[in-house]
Image (cartoon, helix red, strand yellow):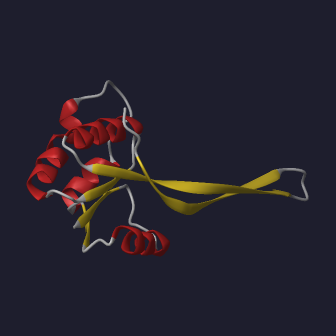
Amino acid sequence: MKMFVILSHKLSEIQIQEINQRFKIDDIVYLPDSLQKIWSNIPPSGEWQEDFLREIKNWLSKQLKKGDKLIVQGEFGATFCLVQWLKKRGYVVYYATTERKVIEEQLKDGTIRTNRIFQHVNFREYPAG
C-alpha cells in the first residue's frame, strides 16, 4: 500500500513517522517535479478552471491502486476539487492538522514582533460530504 502526498512541501520527519506507524505504508510517493510545480502554483486570480488539475488527475489515475491512501492539502479550491474527485473513486484522503503557537515580543521601540509556530498534530481523514 502506498501513501501519495500532494502538498506544496515535503513531509516532516514527525509526519513520516506517523505515516509509517499508523498506516503501515510500504512507500511514500510524491508528485513528479513537473506536477509538483503545477500543484504549488495554482493561479490565484481569475475563475477556477478544471484544466488546472487535468495532468495531476491523469497521473493519479495511472498510479493509484486499490487500498492506496492520499494526503492532499494546498490551494483551497484545488484541494476541494481533488479530494472530491478522489473520494468519488473510493480513496481515503487525509489532511494534516496543526497546533499554532503565537509568541509575541514587545520591542524597545514599542512595536510588537509576532512569531507563529506550526506544529504537526496528526493526519485526519476528510469527512464525507
Q: Is residue 23 left or right of residue 98?
A: left
Q: Locate the N terminus and report the quarter of the image it occupies.
A: bottom left
Q: Residue at x 74, y 54 (%)?
A: 114
User: Is the residue 8 above or below the residue 55 in the image?
Assistant: below
User: Is the residue 4 above or below the residue 48 in the image?
Assistant: below
Q: Is residue 27 left or right of residue 21?
A: left
Q: Residue furthest left?
A: 62
Find residue 96 and report its horizontal and vertical position in percent.
47, 55
Find residue 73 and report its horizontal and vertical position in percent.
39, 49
Of 97 and 79, nearer the camera is: 97
The quarter holding residue 57 reads: top left
Of 73 and 110, nearer the camera is: 73
Q: Residue at x 86, y 58 (%)?
A: 107
Q: How many marks?
A: 0
Find residue 12 and report its horizontal and vertical position in percent.
46, 70
Q: Is residue 125 left or right of residue 122?
A: left
Find residue 120 and report its horizontal and vertical position in percent.
54, 62
The quarter holding residue 126 reads: top left
User: Is the residue 54 above or below the residue 10 in the image?
Assistant: above
Of 94 and 58, nearer the camera is: 94
Q: Residue at x 21, y 45 (%)?
A: 90
